[in-house]
Amino acid sequence: MVERYARPQMTELWTQQARYAAWLEVEIAAVKAWNKLGLIPDEDCQKIVQNAKFSVERIEEIEAVTKHDLIAFNTSVSESLGEESRWFHYGMTSSDAVDTGVALQMRDSLQIIIDDVKMLMESIKKRAMEHKYTLMVGRSHGIHGEPITFGLTLAVWYDETARHLKNLEQTMEVIAVGQISGAMGNFAHAPLELEEFAMAELGLKPEPCSNQVIHRDRYARLATALALLASSVEKFAIQVRHLQRTEVYEAEEYFAKGQKGSSAMPHKRNPILTENITGLARMIRAYCIPAMENVALWHERDISHSSTERFWLPDSFITTDFMLHRMNSVIANLTVMPENMMKNLNLTGGLVFSQRVLLELPLQGVSREDAYRIIQRNAMKVWEEIQQGKPTTNESGESLYLQYLLADDELRSKLSEEQIRECFDYSYYTKNVDGIFKRVFK
């Protein structure tokens, strides 16, 4: 079994300890930058770098009085230092530490998501290669269309996930941005070089023109990228849920020994993992709303965004991480039933070959309209037989649709028996699978 739960690394990135640790990393980068610019003496810089620390409990005690988390944080850190504490947070505003700290958390969290997506793609690719030529029926509107392979279905998933990977990698460039521009972002109390040195130390890019915050369209880009990813993962999950329906039963979530599906009905084997993924995707998409509404702040900033980000940022990352691991487990351990796929492919008595026959008639000089009329009238006869529960093949195994076509005088005047029978060949539908796979898997 593949691990299906979110990794501890993600949840650890969003604890209070991690939040303050990110702030401290930003503050120390600023101290090093001031030292490089000649303001802070080497000895004071070294003391701050080596000794600066904080206590979550102490911060909470101070904040209960100050009602300001960044001031409480600065006070806690200053208590761990001596006279050199005068250089801590020098020339900075709260958002310099907070927003740049969040940028570090988002960057590290998004890297985990990117790694998750690559993991998922590998699992999809492995199963696609396994079922490259496993025939199944393609469906539109839930109705049987034409033969495809399960490998092609998985190739679609892989290609779609690859687009999300590219989008996430581009989103990383958008969110890995920090600032140390001071109150109102005017750099009145710190030179631009300070921000450039500090961001280089942190592995971030400077916000080209901040006001007092990192602009929230960057965060909204992140939220929408995760929501789009979640929507595709839900698409894959819904496909699995459909394939597991009793009437279809072409694939099934792995059902472990000792697992139970219902408190009342012992026979049940339910698609609980993919149903769970559907619910998780709804939550991830919901976070787009506060993220986009946070773009419009008053003037140079307000803090209406702050409260929502304490919810949606950690929740969206943790939930996406969990969802991707769960989907990876579903795919890696999916029970695929090729025999049932073939049984369903034959369920409509050869109707899946209707277009193949249709396209032969224009080659013999028949108009599109006449060809469609001939092919459809025989197809409708098969549907009537199916509605009445009659067999869809005869004793020799010939499909009902083939029988009707061979008995149609108008069709036989245009196509020979051999030509009609050649249209009922499954290999016709798999002849370009290799080419499609080369496109998708390079």
Image: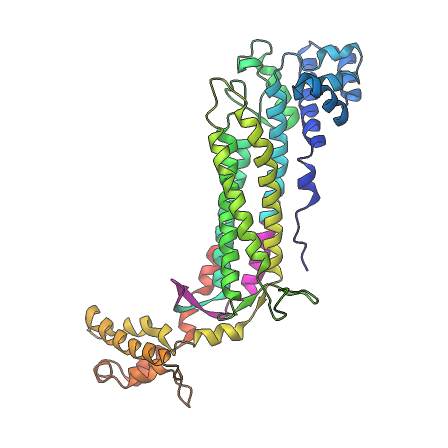
Q: Which of the two residues, 102 or 118, is positioned nearer the viewer here?
A: 102
Task: Determine whether 411 is above or below 169 in the image.
Answer: below
Is residue 134 highlighted in magenta?
Answer: yes
The colour scheme is: rainbow
- Drawn side of residue 172 relative to residue 354, left or right: right
- Drawn side of residue 403 relative to residue 62, left or right: left
- Drawn side of residue 409 relative to residue 325, left or right: left
Task: Determine whether 345 is above or below 62 in the image.
Answer: below
Residue lying farthest to the front in this orientation = 264
How far across and down, in percent of the image, does residue 125 sit?
A: 56, 58
The residue under the point 61% across, 37% down is 314
How far across and down, in percent of the image, does residue 389 sit?
A: 39, 81
- Residue 165 visible at all: no
Image quarter of residue 212:
top right
- Residue 217 visible at all: yes
Task: Determine whether 266 is above or below 229 in the image.
Answer: below
The residue under the point 53% across, 12% down is 186
How far across and down, in percent of the image, does residue 4 sit?
A: 65, 53
- Drawn side of residue 412 relative to residue 398, left or right: left
How far across and down, in percent of the image, does residue 233 sit?
A: 52, 51
Q: Which of the two residues, 332 or 6, is positioned nearer the viewer here?
A: 6
Residue lying farthest to the bottom in this orientation = 395
Is residue 413 highlighted in magenta?
Answer: no
Q: Could you tell me which quadrant the N terminus lies in?
A: bottom right
Instruction: Count numbered badges in the picture.
Output: 0
The residue under the point 30% across, 75% down is 357
Q: Which residues are magenta?
A: 118-144
